[in-house]
Image (cartoon, rainbow, N blue to C red):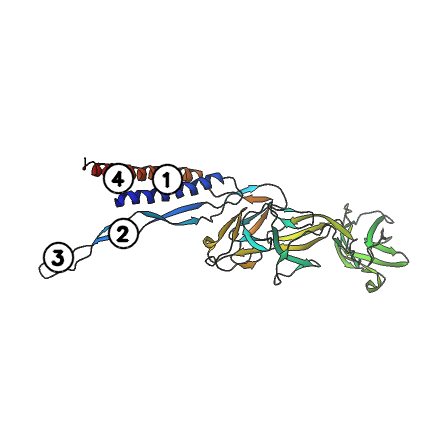
Amino acid sequence: MLRSLYSGISGLRAHQTMLDVTGNNIANVNTTAFKASATQFQDTLSQLTQGAGGPGATTGGTNPAQVGLGVQVAGIATNFAQGSSQATGKASDMLISGDGFFVTQQGGETVYSRAGAFDFDAAGRLVTPSGAIVQGWGAVDGVVNEGGAVGDLSLPVNAVTPGKATSGIAMTGTLPSDAVKGTQLLRDVKVYDASGAARTVSLTFTKAETGAGWNVSGVDGDRTASAELVFTGKVLTSGGPLVLGDPAAGGVTVDLAKLEAMAGISTVKASPDGSAPGSLESYSFAKDGTLVGLFSNGEQKALGRIALATFTNPGGLEKTGSNGYRATFNSGTAELGAPGSAGLGSLTGGALEMSNVDLSQEFTNLIVAQRGFQANARIITTSDEVLQELTNLKR
């Protein structure tokens, strides 16, 4: 048979593969974090009909004569270029800006993904739409140990944060220096004991009978204290603090050092430390992948951190479906780290990475593949006509 016949067949197969790859890219134009693929061709082994000849004293050298035997697919490469960002407003959706892959576990297998369309299941675990569990590091008392082994990242829906005893109250703002003598300003401050129970500390500021100073007294249950505040201009030069019992035994110290005095202005306010016990109300993700819990007492505490993976050769990863990839011998071993660390991208919450398929390029590839397929089909029909002429010699 004619060699061109088999060359045409190999061309049909190769361009059919190109059509398949291009069609898959177009089909996934709206798939979250999909990475487009490209078909790479190479020629097959060529048949040597005449070897090369070296130059002689009276003759020149000759080049080898070879007849190619067709084309084959050398490989299908994945383009890991960053896709565009699409804002969703959903707190559990995340986009990786830069390199890196999310680490997930499903059925005991580790699968890597760029798609950050996550949600929490009934057990409080962060999962993908296909049910794979996102991996990361848990937190103990708000501290994340990145050096430990990764595990299922979960949101403890029944989490509570204990109360913190109030040990100090910082007073800030301005007292009116031109107030009438005997004028009183009252400030009731809510404070907490070690169990988180609330009580009220009452502070009374009274304009002194002489001079521009103020007298302050504090009452905390059966604990009382008082001080005289002296101002030079607007600056407090003496007075305070108020010590309402031993802080180590549940007492409170009132810091007055930041008070000022100006005419016609009264903006005194109290800022106590300590807090009541709180329950988890909502959550958010930081750029470093930290899952931050927002509690009813206003406290924010780290609950865990998402782990990202990077590979020496991402092109060596094997697609597993459901936006996942599996490590292979040629991808290298996954190197884990926190978002924002060297070689890993940062995270953006409330957004997803779009497909990086370029439709204009894919439709061009579609035309190229179609014309290549037609041209190779013409090789086969032409070879068939030659064979027909050959068989017609015997009649």
Depth check, mark 2 against mark 4: the one in front is 4
The residue positioned 40% from the left and 43% from the top of the image is 17
Find disc 4 in the rendering and name its residue. 383
The residue positioned 46% from the left and 54% from the top of the image is 316
Residue 281 location, x and y as percent? Answer: 73, 47
Left or right: where does residue 77 sit relative to residue 95? left
Find disc 1 in the rendering and name its residue. 369
Mark 3 vs mark 2, CA separation in Å: 24 Å
Q: In the depicted view, which residue is nearer to us: 326 or 253?
A: 326
**N-terminal of the two: label 3 or label 1?**
3
Depth check, mark 4 against mark 1: the one in front is 4
Q: Residues within 10 Å of mark 4 (few under 14, many from 20)?
A: some
Q: Is residue 137 visible?
A: yes
Quarter of the N terminus within the rendering: top left
When asked about the image quadrant of residue 214, the answer is bottom right
**N-terminal of the two: label 2 or label 1?**
2
